[in-house]
Each structure stands twice: as C-alpha cells, then as structure tokens.
Image: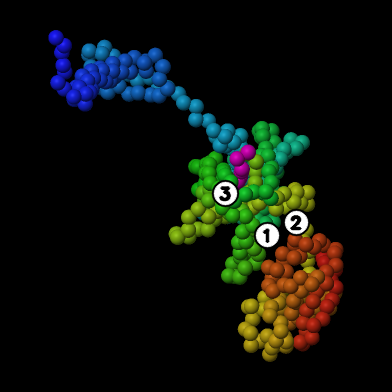
Amino acid sequence: MGYYDDHSPQTQQKRTRRRWVMPTIVGGVLGAVLVLLALPALVQTELLPYDMTIPEDESGLVDDNQGLTGDTKSVSVDVTTQITDVVEQVTPTVVGVVNLQTRENFWQEGAEDSSQQAGVGSGVIYKKEDGTAYVVTNNHVIEGASEIEVVLADETRITAELIGGDVFTDLAVLKMPGEQVEQVSELGSSEDLKVGEPAIAIGNPLGLSFAGSVTQGIISGKERAIPQDFNGDGLEDWQAEVIQTDAAINPGNSGGALINIEGQLIGINSMKIAQSSVEGIGFAIPIDSAKPIIDELEQKGQVDRPYIGIEAYGLNEVPTSEWGNTLNLPEDVEGGLYIRSIRQMSPAAKAGLEPLDVITALDDEPVEDIIDLRKYLYNEKNPGEEMEITYYRDGQQQTTTITLGSQE
C-alpha cells in the first residue's frame, strides 16, 4: 500500500529549514570560540599585522588554562610619509638667531659692558661658498644687535656677522664660518603657488626651547598687502606683499622657513595677526620677492633704492577745506601727494619742486599717498634714471623731469 504524506509542500519546507537552524548556530559559536583560543598564538607567531594586548587577571597573568603570560608582542609600523622625509631634510638648514645687545653694567662702576640676549628668532641657511655659510632672516630679528649668534640644529652656537638688512622687505643676511654646516636649503619658487596646496613652517617659536618646531597647513592666499608702520606714528609707511598661510607662526618663528611639499623654500616667515578673535593667519615673504633683495644685501650690504629727497603726505591726511584754501587745488583733483619739505641739493630741489606742490602722477601713473610713491620708485625705477612728475602749484598743472638719486 502506498504512503501518502498528508502535509502540504509549504509545511514540509518549513520543517526542513528548522533542521538547519540549530547546526548553523552551534557551528558559529564553536568557530568563534576556536578563533578566540587561537588568536593569542597567532599574535605570538607575528602572523597578524597589529598589536593585541592579552587581558590580565589581578596577578598579572592570563587564564592558567591558556598557559600564557601577560607579555605583549609589539609590531612596528612604518609611518614615514613625504612630509616626514621633507622635514628631516630641511630641519638642519633652519637655525636659531640670537640678538645680543650691549648693556651697561649698572652695579659696578668702570666694569666692562656685557652682552645680553634681547631676542631670539629663526633663520635659514641658503648658501655655502668658500668656507662661508649665509643665513637669511628677518631684519626685525637682528635690529639693534651688537652681536649675533646662530644656533645650529645640533645646538652648536656660532658667532655671525651682519652683512646688511632692509627695513622695507624685513630681510637681513648674515654670514658665518661654514665648517659645521653640512647642508643648505633648496630655493623654490613662489610664483606658481596655488591656494590650498600644503605648506610647512619650521622655526623656533617662543625661543630655543622649542627649536625646530614644525607646523603644517596650506597656502591660504597670495599677494596679500599688509600695512606696516616703521616709525610708530600710527601712519602706514609701506605695504608688504606676503603669502598667507594657516600653518602656525608664533613669536620666534620670524625668519624661519616656509616650505612646499617638495622641501623647497618658498617663503621667509615674517609675521602673524595677533588678536584674540583671529586664528590661523600667518604671513611669509615670497621667496621670489626675497631673492633679489638677498642677492643685493649679500653683494652690497644694502639695497640701493631711488631717492628724490622730499617729505610728503597724502591729501587724505589734509582737511578737504585746505585743498582749495591753502593748496589752491582745482575741484577735479581727487587725490595726490603734497610736499611738506624738500632736502637741499636733492633731486627734487634740482628739478624745481617746492613745498606745498601736489604730486598727482609719476610717468603718468597716478599716485595718491606715500605708499604709491614708494612702490613706483622701488619697484619700477633705478637710481640714475629719469622720471616725469606731474604736479599742481597754485592751481596750475605742471610737469618736470627728475633724475633719481640713490638712497643713502
């Protein structure tokens, strides 16, 4: 007699599935237990690519059933990157620059004056030639120094000589014996920098205690114009064109290196905006702007700039009521530079300029303040060249040609 299964096909399928559920669970549990038991042994044989700490009991040993001590096996991981390679390469070329100033011995009459540390900044070794090493730093780092010391990466101190400094670009060049200098920084280019590309700052923030500190960021901006007041009168004397970066730059970093991802020097760290509400805004002198100044300082000890011999101020510093009453300017004059005084026998005096003349253009280029005048002179002209000046005197527009002198 045939057998007839009275269960439907669906009911039979459910029972078949249930038969496999329990073996699957049991197999998973057994597999997990085996892995946990075998894992310490695998770590001991260094087959796993990470560290594992085996839990200890209060006696400092693991479960006696495992027969293992609480020791761990350290596995070294290579974390070397392009940045660490670059930093290792460049750091020996970044030095400390110590400003020593002579102080009179107050307590002992007739005693010799002593040199005391007035400040510490940073510098970059950019050249070594004929046994002499050359360092570029900021002018404000060495300002007023009677003696200068350079501190190498290995803390060796070497007395350096100031070749020359320039207040407008805030650059200075030092030279020192090069016997202990093994490498120099590779100069890059700042012209092709792109906003957002990596930037690395190396220097001595807050002094030599943090020598060789490294901070990383990006290029935040190019060709930034930062006003500068050299004589402390509250008026702008110059506008420095700088690179902006968010790599941390602190006091002591001045004169240090701003480098690109290739390890090339692209800027000389110079300043930051120090306000409680501001974070991550630092500035560096572009290396392309610094190169010709460095070369001139190295060769001549100073930067020869054109000179005309006037004391002048922008019309924006003069009450508008005086534009017509005192200077007799026509209403269509909107800006310019009035001459307050002229040095005797200067190029300006020889060209016939007089106090209260108002300069409005240099070689047909409009000027409105002393910064415009300096930028045109220092960037476009050289000593000995001629320059046409457009000016107003007693309401009449006139022109004269001046032969530029050399700034002393």
Where is mark 2, residue-wise?
A: 303
Amino acid bearing label 3: Gly
Q: Earlier in the sequence, mark 1 or mark 2?
A: 1
- Label placed on residue 77: none
Mark 2 packing: few (<14 Cα in 10 Å), some, or many (20+)? many
Question: Among all residues in the image, which is located at the extreme top?
Answer: 1
Residue 216 position in % (x across, y down): 53, 44
Where is mark 1, residue-wise?
A: 168
Amino acid bearing label 1: Phe
Q: Is residue 321 magenta?
A: no
Mark 1 and mark 2: span between their CA atoms?
10 Å
Q: Secondary structure at mark 1?
A: loop
- Disc 1 + disc 2, Cβ < 8 Å: yes
Amino acid bearing label 2: Val
Residue 275 position in % (x across, y down): 48, 60
Mark 2 and mark 3: span between their CA atoms?
33 Å
User: Which residues are drawn in magenta?
Assistant: 256-262
- Label placed on residue 196: 3
- Horizontal side of 306 relative to 20 (left or right) equals right
Q: Earlier in the sequence, mark 1 or mark 3?
A: 1
